[in-house]
Amino acid sequence: MPIEPLRLKKLDPLAELSDEDVMERCAQGSEAAFRTLVSRYRSRIMNLVCRFINDRDRAEEISQEVFLRVFRNRERYRKSGKFSTWIFTIAVNLTKNEIRSRVRHRGTYSLDAMEEDAGGQGLPFPDANPLPDQDLNALEIRRRVTEALRKIPPRYREAVVLRDVEGLSYEEVGEILRIPGGTVRSRINRARLMLKERLKPYLSVEDV
Amino acid sequence: MNCRSAESLFSAFIEDELSQEERRSLESHLLACRRCALSVKELRATLELCSTLPTFETDAHFEEDVMDRIRSGEALRPTLIEWLRETLTPERLRPAFLAGATVCAAWIAVLVVHPSATHDTPTPVATRTPAAGPGANGPEVVATAPAFPSTRPDVAPTRGTAAASRASTGATSPAVSDGGDFAWADREVRVRPAHADSTLPNGENRYQDEYILDQFYLNRGDQDGVHSIVPVSGQNTDDVYITF
C-alpha cells in the first residue's frame, strides 16, 4: 500500500488573531492584515448599510468607503477599544451622512424616494436562488420582516439593527450611537414592539 | 405594576436582564394580565423572525475594488473634517500660538514704554471733494472730528471759522482739523448735499457745500419771531443749511 506523502497545511498566521491584533498589524503597514479585516467584516458592513439605504450599488460604495476610512485612519485606532465598535461607528456615520445628503436634496426622508434613486427597482431581496414551494412562505415572511424593519423610524431602526441583526451588545450599541445605556435599552424595546405590531399577522402564537 | 410599565421591561425580561425583584414583579403581572402575556410571546416570535433575516453579500470583486482605490491614492485624500482634525492638533497649533503671544507681548511692552507712540501720527479726519461748480451733484460731505483732541503743545486750540475753512480747503484735498476742543468735535456735522434743485432755473444749486468749522447757536428772534443760526465767530450763515 503506497504511503501518501505528508502534506503540511499552510496556516494563515492572522487567522488566529483577534480583530484588534490584526488591526495593529495593519497599522504597522501589513496589507495582508488589512485584507483579513476586509474579508471578516465586508458582509457585516454591507448588511448594516443595506438595512438603511435602499440602494444596493450605493450601499456597496459606502461599504468600500468604510474600509478606506479604516485604512486612512489606521494609525489613529486605539487598541483599547473594540475594533468592531470602531468600524461600525464609521459605517453608521457614513450611512447617516448619506441619509442627510438625500434629505437635503429631496427635502424629506423616504424609503420610496430612495427606491426611486436606485432606479425604481429597490433593493433586491438577497435570496436569489429559486426555492421549493414549501419555502416560498418563509421567503415571503422574510420579505415582510425586512419591510417592517425599514418602516420603523431611523433612530429606533439603527438601535435594533445593531443589536438584533448584527448581534452587538447594548454597551457597543450605546458607544456606536453615542447614547447612554438606558436610552439604548429603551429604543431597542420600543423598536421591537413596533416590529411586533407590524408583523403580527405573520406571528404564529397561540393564545393561552 | 401596570401594563405600561410592564411593557417597558419586555425586552429585558426576554433577555434575562432583569433584577430578581423586577422579574418577580413582572411575572406576577403576566400571570394576571392575559394581554401582556400574549405580547411577550409575540415579542419572542418577532425576535426569532429577525434572527432569520438573510444577509446582503458584497460583490465578488469587493476586496479588489477596495485595494485598487487604495493603490490609486485617489480615495485616500482626507476629507475636509479629517484635514481640519489633522491640522488643528495642539502640536501644530502650539508654534503659531506662541508666535502670536510673543507679538502681543512685544506690542504691549511698546505701549507701556512709549505710550504716546500711537498718537504721533496725525490722522486726516475729513476729506472733501469740492463742488465742481454750479449744477454739479457732489457727494454728501461729512466732516468728522477726531475722537481724541490733539494734545500737542504747539497746536493751540483755535476756533475755526467758515472763512478759515474756505481758505484752508483750497481746491484739492482739504483735510481739515484744527485739533480744537469744541463740543461739536464729538459729532458729525453734515452739510446738505449739493443736489441740483429742480425748482430753481437751470438746475442751480441752492446751497454750497462747505466745511463747517465753527460752533453755531440758535438766535431766537424774540421780537420779530424770526430765528437764525449764528456762528460763534459772527459770520453770517444764511447760505448754510445744517442738519445734526
Image (cartoon, coloured by chain):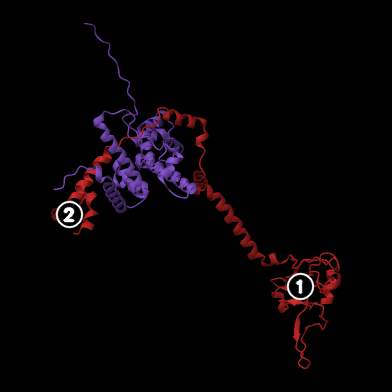
Chain colours: A purple, B red
Residue A110 is at least partly visible in this image: yes
The percent coordinates of residue A6 (x first, y second) are: 27, 13
**Helix or strand or loop: what does disc 2 sit on?**
helix
Q: Quadrant of the N terminus of chain B?
A: bottom left
In the figure, is residue B72 to the left or right of A43?
right
Q: Is residue B154 above or below residue B48?
A: below
In the figure, is residue A58 to the left or right of A162?
right
Q: Are marks 2 and 1 in contact (CB under 8 Å)?
A: no
Residue B15 is at least partly visible in this image: no
**Disc 2 sits on a residue from what chain?**
B
Q: Is residue B134 above or below residue B58?
A: below
The percent coordinates of residue B9 (x first, y second) are: 23, 53
Q: Going 46% across and 45% down the picture, which residue do you hit? A: A102
- Judge if badges 2 and 1 mark residues of a common chain: yes
Q: Going 48% across and 48% down the picture, which residue do you hit? A: A104
Label 1 amino acid?
Arg
**Helix or strand or loop: what does disc 1 sit on?**
loop
The part of the image, by quadrant, that contains residue A55 is top left
The part of the image, by quadrant, that contains residue B7 is bottom left
Is B86 or B5 nearer to us in this picture? B5
**Disc 1 sits on a residue from what chain?**
B
Q: Which mark is residue B123?
A: none
Is A96 or A75 nearer to us in this picture? A96
Is B162 or B24 nearer to us in this picture? B24
Residue beneath disc 1 = B192
Whichever of callouts 2 and 1 sits on the residue coming sooner in the sequence is: 2
Q: Is residue A120 above or below residue A187?
A: above
The percent coordinates of residue B47 (x first, y second) are: 25, 43
Q: Which mark is residue B26?
A: 2
In the figure, is residue B95 to the left or right of A40?
right
Q: Is residue B184 above or below residue A9?
A: below
Label 2 amino acid?
Leu
